[in-house]
Image: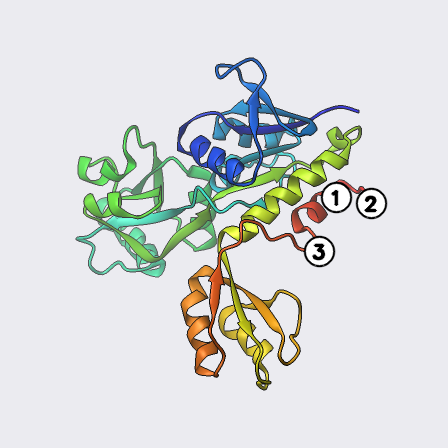
Amino acid sequence: MSSLLLALPSKGRLHDQMNKFFESSGLKLSRSGGNRTYSGFIEGIEKIEILYLSASEISSELLKGNIHMGITGIDLIEESRTSASKEVIMLSKLGFGKANVVIAVPNSWIDVENIKDLSEVASEFRSYNNRRMRVATKFKNITRNFFSNNGISNYRLVDSAGATEGSPAAGTSEIIVDITETGQTIDANNLKILKDGVMLKSQSCIFSTPNDIWDDIDLGPVEKFLRIISARSEAMNKAELFFDYTKDTSDLEINLYRKFKAIFSKGSPDLGEATSLIVPISELTSCSLYLTSLGYGPIRTNQPNFIYNRESDSWNILRQSINRA
């Protein structure tokens, strides 16, 4: 059987974040001919051949159907997608490389706070200036689709030759569409993100293309790889709470889920049992305080390195997409 082709980012911050993720997953990457080569493998997992490409190249190769799987950003997949593209499926979000594609306007536009305001201003701008409002961006497809879905038509896309945030100050555009992690650079350029101006929430994910290149691939190593990746990404934003179930509380299990998305790791506990609860890290303190207010405690916490669920969502998605039982 043939080796699976897995494309990974070759350089930059995404490459560094990806390496840290793999290291924390216990997966050791090796280059086939030294650090300067662009191919490699995963130690301990056979029949997976690694290709090191840029993040944009990975998106392009996935959409062409030339590789089996790849790690890249949601923004790059959506920006590169065309009517001729092959189907690309997200198998798992990996929890790093998070950033948002946003719309930002000058702070001086005090009457423009949301998309509806922008739509009205775009029409007025054309009437007053006899030209369309200019939008500087590197994300032309994402911008066109979003504007079309929100009824904005009076605009013209312009290339941002350098830093997109500087375009309004340079006089080459009125507004921008750009990707940002914190929004600090946008603020520093006297721009503001519209209240509903997040066009796309992106992060690094593992994607696959479900075409006939899977026909002679041994899925055993693929399942092992995806289960490890999924278990690590599942654990990254979760914590585990330990406490003794010393009394019955009506509707405790359903209330914990409704309030905090918390789930008992072993199912409904029995009275007197030592139990554990999986909860998003963002809800850790609130959930702990809620339990102590009900009379439980002490509450002990831990952050797991992996959470292996009985069923692996990423593995199931892949198997179903390529019609393999």
Query: What residue is disc 1 on?
Result: 319
Q: Which residue is mark 3?
A: 310
Give percent across and percent down for residue 11.
44, 26
- Can you say which quadrant of the picture contains the C terminus? top right
Mark 3 or 1, closer to the camera:
3
The x, y position of residue 72, in whole percent, is 51, 36
Q: Secondary structure at mark 3?
A: loop
Type of amino acid at the residue the image marks with label 3: Arg
* Disc 3: CA contacts within 10 A as few (<14), some (14-19) or many (>=20): few
Q: Position of residue 27 (x, y in %)?
A: 58, 34
Residue 242 pos. (x, y %): 53, 67
- Name the residue located 49 percent from the left edge and 56 percent from the top edge: 303
Q: Secondary structure at mark 1?
A: helix
Looking at the image, residue 86 lies above or below residue 109: above
Structural distance between the alpha carbons of marks 3 and 1:
16 Å
Determine the residue positioned at 56% across, 23% down.
Answer: 30
**In the picture, residue 208 is in which quadrant?**
top right
Q: Quadrant of residue 258?
A: bottom right
Amino acid under label 2?
Ala
| Image marks 2 and 1: residues in contact by CB distance under 8 Å | yes
Give amino acid for label 1: Arg
In the rendered image, the vertical position of residue 54 relative to residue 178, given as above or below: above
Q: Nearer the viewer, mark 2 or mark 3?
A: 3
